[in-house]
Amino acid sequence: MEPKTNKSGQAIAINGLVKRHGQREILRGVSLEIASGSTMALIGPSGGGKSTLLRCLAGLEAFQDGSVTFDNKTIKAGEHHENGAWLRSCVGMIFQDYQLFPHMTVADNIAAAPQWVSGLRREEATALAMKLLDKVGLKDQARSFPSRLSGGQKQRVAIARALAMEPRVLLCDEITSALDPETKSDVLNVLEEIRAEGLTIVMVTHEIGFARRAADRVALLADGHVAECGAAADVIDRPSSERAARFLAQVMG
Amino acid sequence: MAGFWPLAALILLSTAPAAEPLRWGCDEEGGAPYCFKRQTGDGFERVGFEVDITKALSARLGRPITFTQYPFDNLVPGLKKRDFDLAMNGLEVTPDRRREVLFCRPYYLYRQQLVCRIGESRFTDYTTLKNTLPRAKVGTMDATAAERILANDGFDVAGYPAPTEAYRDLGLGRLDAVLLDLPMAISYARKDKALAFAGQAFAPGRYAIAVHPEDTVLKTKIDAGIDALIADGTLRGILEEWGLWDEFQATHLQTATSDDSWELETDHTGENWTVMRYLPLLLEGAWVTVRLTAASFALAMALGLLVAVTRLYAPQPFAMLAIAYVEFFRGIPVLLLLFFIYFGLPAMAESAGWNGLGEWITPFVAATLGLGLNYAAYEAEIYRASLQAVPRGQWEAAACLGMSPNLTFNRIILPQALRTALPPMTSDMVALFKDTSIASAIALVELNKEYQILAKSSLKFVEIGLVTAALYLALSLPLGYLSRYLEKAWNTDSHGT
């Protein structure tokens, strides 16, 4: 019942990933290594391919060339149909717009998948939900419906919901973009706690400050390429490419 | 110019009454042998013994008589509204009708003829039918003397708009017997090899021409005309030509009158129709309406969901079929569908050598199928729109939690879609509730049909109409209230994501 966060996160290897929407190439051969239990922040200008890369890792999008390796299992282009479900079962995904289930209470949002997918008894699933709500500081909201929560509270419920399925990789797609500064910090604190427990985390973010503090490594994606990748401090403070320097100058103001 | 208008008015007043034709109200759908259309070489010709009588009468009166098509069961109200000048269509002289209109001298004495399927062993005539099968299902026509006799004797009465349908349903095994006026039995049942006369004709009565209660002059003229047609043998000739002249006419027609000195029918109507007498019957009809609404809406919801899901998620050819379903059933009138299911399907099955279908498709089954199939098309569109209104992100969030598409649909998408669908669904259900009245066309006695039967028998159109409307409202208003309540309750729970 205890979320197996003691089990180390998976290592991810992305090799020459190509993703096309019709004629448009969104990812043009992206290669990245993400070490087990590390946190990788994906930064870069809009339309650079960050979210698309994340969705490919989550098994929500098929890719046309290259491969993705989780620990020892490699998924090649064209195998999406067979392996998409396997990918989705490895990862927990958190969305910018939460996507909580509006017709269920907060506790049921979290307990649903453990009960229906993992086959936990209802009491077990509810107990798990309560434990995770405690962890994200929302135990008192267990019986509320999502419509009653603030944006930051919704996002913390979404994190708890993802953790309930014991993922070994957590994918975060701009999870603080829609939040105001106060609630944002609650969410980021929760994320830092999880990071300390050893999950592999890949996050798309515009929070350069948070990326620098919380991420082990940062990859800057622009025009479907990895423009720069390295230790967080190196990439953000001392960008080596002209493209990265220009982007950082813009966002840091 | 000043002298023109008085002059014109004088000319009109003096010439119009003589030249003006008499409008004859009659329902040619009622059929043979009264007045019906028969195919001739290159078209249709209106024929029947009443057509022949009006021709003879027209010559006697020196006035043309023109035909006006009018529903049989509304002939008396139509006459009172002066939609035509005389009603003649096998209209029986009854005490209650005599209170409303003026009857002229009878031109034919009808009797009731019971008809059964050939080889019927359970009864031989009306008396044995009453004794051995007191709750038998007996067909007849709406607002006829036969209908009143059957209702009074406690039979399960199926009233049809025309004799053909009644005899056909008897042949198909949906009825135990049919009781109708002898002329219809002679015209239709005698030709039908599957049917036979059961016993002698009984319960005599009079057919007479009816006119507006104020048209006493016209009545006197028509009386004289009929007298003359009887005296010179013209009427006998016409009736013989149509196979209707018999011993009974020969003995009694000469002396028959339209007043109560020659009363043959008992008064089933008028003052006898108290609230306590008709309310139980209306409630019985209301119960049929409620059951029909529930059954057909359940079918519409299940089928509509299937069609919507097929259209959204099934492979191309199946999705096209779903679209075709919606377009087809939205595009055809429900009434046509009901007639097709009730009368058409059994006939098709019979010609394919399968005879059981007619008994299985009762009016209730046919109405449930027809309304259900029709409303499923509307429900499908509501469900489709509601399913599409659920954000795509809900599918993705569920997928990332390891939920299969089926599980996601059943537990995540559908519950949200149903909330969106609820208000339009309830308003459809109220519409369906009222549309069930269409089922009266296939002899299902629901609330509206019960009203028609009672109102036409008692002629208490307003009083019983108000009670019926109150019953409809009492049933439909709570539905609307329930919808608003559910909508509100669900919205406070689940607004936004």
Image: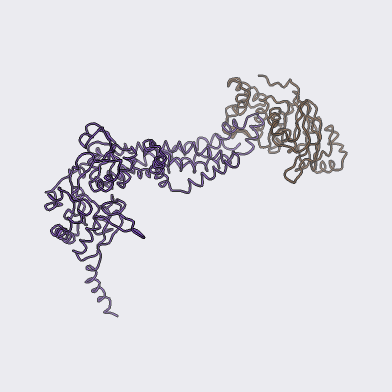
Chain colours: A brown, B purple
Name the residue located 57 percent from the left edge and 37 percent from the top edge: B495
In this orientation, does residue B235 appear?
yes
Residue A181 pos. (x, y %):
71, 36
Position in image of residue A105 (x %, y %): 58, 29
Q: Dividing the image into 4 quarters, which one contains the C terminus of chain B?
A: top right
| Residue for point 73% across, 25% down | A168
From this view, report whether residue B466 is shown above or below residue A232.
Answer: below
Between B101 and B412, the residue placed more toward the observer is B101
Query: Within the image, what quadrant is residue B4 found in?
Result: bottom left
Foreground pick, B282 / A134 = B282
Q: Nearer the viewer, residue B36 or B384?
A: B36
Image quarter where the N terminus of chain B lies is bottom left
Total numbered labels placed on residues in the image: 0
Viewer-nearest residue: B54 or A207: B54
The extreme bottom residue here reads B1
Based on the displayed image, in which of its 4 quarters is residue B435 positioned?
top left
Residue B22, given in percent of the width and then of the height, sits at: 24, 62
Left or right of B87: which side holds A160? right
Residue A223 in the image: state x and y as whole percent: 79, 43
Q: Please indicate, yes or no, whether residue B364 appears anywhere in the rendered image.
A: no
Q: Which quadrant of the structure image shows residue B281?
A: top left
